[in-house]
């Protein structure tokens, strides 16, 4: 193990030990009944550096619902298919409003602010669905995740998908509202079906950190040498993650952590230290913005210890 790997491992261990003890854990997502049942005591962290060294702590191998972290990967897929034409259907500015907000959509004529708020992600999923059956679109997303995670056991938690399908009234409203502007091409219920299932993909921190490696290394997995996207595209996805990846908590995340990151209401966060590492953390309790409470605190501690903020030490 080289010196850096040793330093990372020590930092990860210290953070996992500290997070295990903390009493302030946030609130699990109650609006999706299946997620409300998850034990807030869980905490997992995995850091994979540029050499492929894996440092892990806590529940690193326990699968959780990746929820909105999936939006990074559907954006990557859709950019691969549509290129920059994608930006005609969805913007790339921070929204400054909640992940499931509908207000901006009215005065911006149904064009979502960015691909990471729910409306934007539903529009991106609709683009992936076009020309396919929902089953095929979902298969493409799942295959992509398995390929990136280098693990064919990645699967969808059907109970979570069904739970959201039953109760996702806001997302149903968002999709129908966008449909009225012609931003959604497919029948809204089919687009939503794919969207709810992509959010219900279950992955562990180890799988998620592996999947994110192309974003840390100019679009390619340094281990396999496999190119996923052009370097410029990886840089731009990171930029959108930095500015929009934590909804209206994105400014706070940049201020405290200083890395591109994407959160999900399952309590997962994928964070990218460009050129250095892909990082996944998981703690199911959320803060008021719907971002993992301890996940953010753990990442803040990690970047501080390692001097990894993109804004300086
Ligand atoms: N499936 C969730 C929803 O659409 C995703 C939200 C999130 O993870 O932030 O409400």
Image: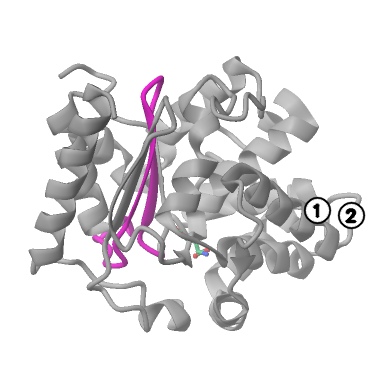
199 in magenta: no
Does 272 lie within the magenta span? yes
Q: Which residue is mark 2?
A: 132
Work out whether residue 128 or residue 178 is closer to the camera in this orientation and state it: 128
The C terminus - image quarter: top left
Mark 2, Cα crowd under 10 Å, few <14 / some 14-19 / many 20+, is few
Q: Residue at x 70, y 39 (%)?
A: 77
Q: Is residue 181 visible?
A: no
Would you say residue 198 is visible in this rendering?
Answer: yes
* Residue 165 screen position, x and y as percent: 62, 78
Residue 160 quadrant: bottom right
Residue 143: x and y in percent read 73, 52
Q: Residue, x 8% and y 65% (percent of image)?
A: 21
Disc 2 to disc 1: CB gap under 8 Å: yes
Q: Secondary structure at mark 1?
A: helix
Could you tell me which secondary element the residue under label 2 belongs to? loop
> Which residue shows up at 56% across the image and 48% down it?
71
Specify the quadrant that holds the N terminus: top left
Residue 269, horizontal then vertical, whole percent: 37, 49
Total numbered labels: 2
Residue 129's tag is 1
Foreground: 210 or 173?
210
Residue 81, picture quadrant: top right
Q: Which residue of the protein is positioned furthest toward the front in this rendering?
A: 1
Specify start and end residues of the magenta stretch as a single range: 266-291
Q: Residues within 10 Å of mark 1 (few under 14, many from 20)?
A: many
Residue 240, numbered circle: none
Q: Is residue 222 above or below residue 77?
A: above
Q: Does residue 171 sit above or below 248 in this rendering? A: below
């Amino acid at each position: 193990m080289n010196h850096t790997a040793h330093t990372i491992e020590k930092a990860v261990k210290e953070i996992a030990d500290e997070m295990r003890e903390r009493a302030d854990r946030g609130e699990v997502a109650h609006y999706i009944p299946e997620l409300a049942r998850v034990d807030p005591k869980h905490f997992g962290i995995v850091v994979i550096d540029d050499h492929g060294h894996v440092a892990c702590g806590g529940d690193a191998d326990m699968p959780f619902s990746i929820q909105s972290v999936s939006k990074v990967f559907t954006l990557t897929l859709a950019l691969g298919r549509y290129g920059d034409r994608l930006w005609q259907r969805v913007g790339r500015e921070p929204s400054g409003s909640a992940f499931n907000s509908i207000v901006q959509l009215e005065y911006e004529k149904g064009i979502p602010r960015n691909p990471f708020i729910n409306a934007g992600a539903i529009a991106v999923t609709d683009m992936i669905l076009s020309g396919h059956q929902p089953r095929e679109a979902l298969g493409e997303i799942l295959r992509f995740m398995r390929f990136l995670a280098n693990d064919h056991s990645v699967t969808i938690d059907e109970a979570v998908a069904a739970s959201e399908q039953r109760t996702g009234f806001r997302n149903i409203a968002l999709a129908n509202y966008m449909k009225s502007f012609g931003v959604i091409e497919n029948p809204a219920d089919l687009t939503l079906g794919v969207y709810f299932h992509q959010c219900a993909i279950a992955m562990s921190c180890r799988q998620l950190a592996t999947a994110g490696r192309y974003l840390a290394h100019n679009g390619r997995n340094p281990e396999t040498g496999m190119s996923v996207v052009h370097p410029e595209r990886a840089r731009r996805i990171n930029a959108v993650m930095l500015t929009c990846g934590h909804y209206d908590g994105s400014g706070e995340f940049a201020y405290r952590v200083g890395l591109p990151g994407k959160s999900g209401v399952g309590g997962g966060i994928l964070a990218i230290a460009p050129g250095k590492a892909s990082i996944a953390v998981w703690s199911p309790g959320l803060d008021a913005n719907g971002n993992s409470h301890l996940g953010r605190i753990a990442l803040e501690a990690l970047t501080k210890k390692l001097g990894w903020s993109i804004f300086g030490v």
